[in-house]
Image (cartoon, helix red, strand yellow):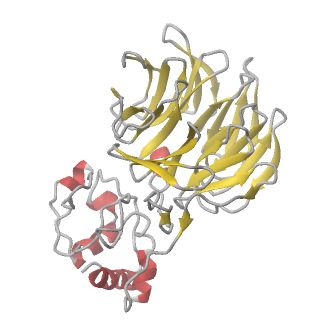
Amino acid sequence: MIRVLLALLLLALPAAAQEFRGHGGPVRALAVTGGLLASGGFDQAVIFWDPHTGQARRVLRWHQGAVNAVLALPDGRLATAGEDARIAIWGPSGEAPERVLEGHSEPVAGLAAQGGLLASAGWDGTVRLWDLATGTARVLEGHGGTVNAVAFAADGALHSTGQDGTLRRWEADGASRLLAEFGLPRTALLALPDGTLAAAGVDGTVNLVSPDGAARELRAGPRPVVALAATADGGTLAVGSIGGSVGLYALPEGRLRATLEGPGLPVWSAAFAPDGRVLWTGGQDRLLRAWDVATARPLAPAAVPVAEALPAGLDPLGAEVWRACQACHALRPDDGPMAGPHLHRLFGRRMGTVPGYQYSERLARGDITWTAETVSDLFTRGPDVVTPGTRMPVQRVGNAEEMAALLRFLEAATR
């Protein structure tokens, strides 16, 4: 289910922030570190933002896949992890990781830290507990499917949840104890200061499990919940969904205090400012948005959407269809890094050949030359059929008139 959610169509306009364009794909993870806001995206980038001015201060491009997790460590460093199955530990200003933790065989979906320990949740079905001083890890096995999230509870115990719909506590000897079974996949996990664990699921619920095992349910809506964040005192819980809603719940009573109006697209990530007065959200529209927690009103976004200036005289219907592609691809090579390679001189080019772009293994084979016929085939049958194993989102153009218009647009705009 999580793999399906991460392959949703990307239908947003590009984002820009003073010196940098901003993320070229949805914002998957957020963390506050050293007075800055760090964001990880589908475009393989980690960006540090000044939360007061909205300016991008630093961009890290090291991961070879979507960045799924960004975590501020207790010692002031930053940990990032993602689709490439690697975990990077970053110092305050380095352009390369201080340490790389490798061992997972599938994407890393979540991180948690306590003291000198780092826990990682992997789609390979394992939880790994890393010693940050040595880089060694214990492999914890027990889940029946992908592990999507990990969290250290207030008592120091490690917990995890995932595709099998269970919430597990890991004992010191590496054995797991089943705390709860929800029946449907869980997507996010958060430890609250009072020892309560919040587990979010694809059924639109957030289950609150207290230290004594008692559980209650918050019904956030009909769409999967994919983002959780709480204030430092645990008094407010933010719940973001694939449907675009963000609810603010007063704890411990679990009362819905406010619903943030504005995102309208999947919200993949959320983080509170240290004082709890501002909530940051990131999602499919590639924007970082700031919200006043007291009033539930939006503040200025950290990145302002701007429409790409298209050459004059292009097919208008084709330009409209192109908007779905524009979330990941630029038409010109100098438009800045994005989630996908630029399409300049697309026709006649072998796939997997744009210099400097990190292709998936399938596209790197370069056994297709892009022509009107092969592009049409790609979006008729779908990237998952034509190029299985690609990181491209699964999207199709089923209308013949729209397909013809898109091809006319591309032929003119990518010359």
Residue visible at 55% across and 11% down?
171
Q: Is residue 221 visible?
A: no
In this view of the protein, which residue sits in the foreground, 102 or 305?
305
Q: Is residue 23 visible?
A: yes
Furthest residue in direction top, as rendered = 173
Query: The C terminus appears in which quarter of the rendering?
Result: bottom left
Q: Where is residue 232 in the image (x, y as percent from the top left)?
A: 71, 32
Q: Position of residue 380 (x, y in %)?
A: 34, 71
Say above or below: 343 vs 110.
below
Residue 377's image quarter?
Answer: bottom left
Residue 141's image quarter?
Answer: top left
In this view of the protein, which residue sits in the foreground, 194 or 391?
194
Say above or below: 407 vs 110.
below
Say above or below: 385 vs 211.
below
Q: Position of residue 162 (x, y in %)?
A: 53, 33
Residue visible at 48% across and 58% down?
8
Say above or below: 128 vs 344.
above
Q: Is residue 369 left or right of residue 277?
A: left
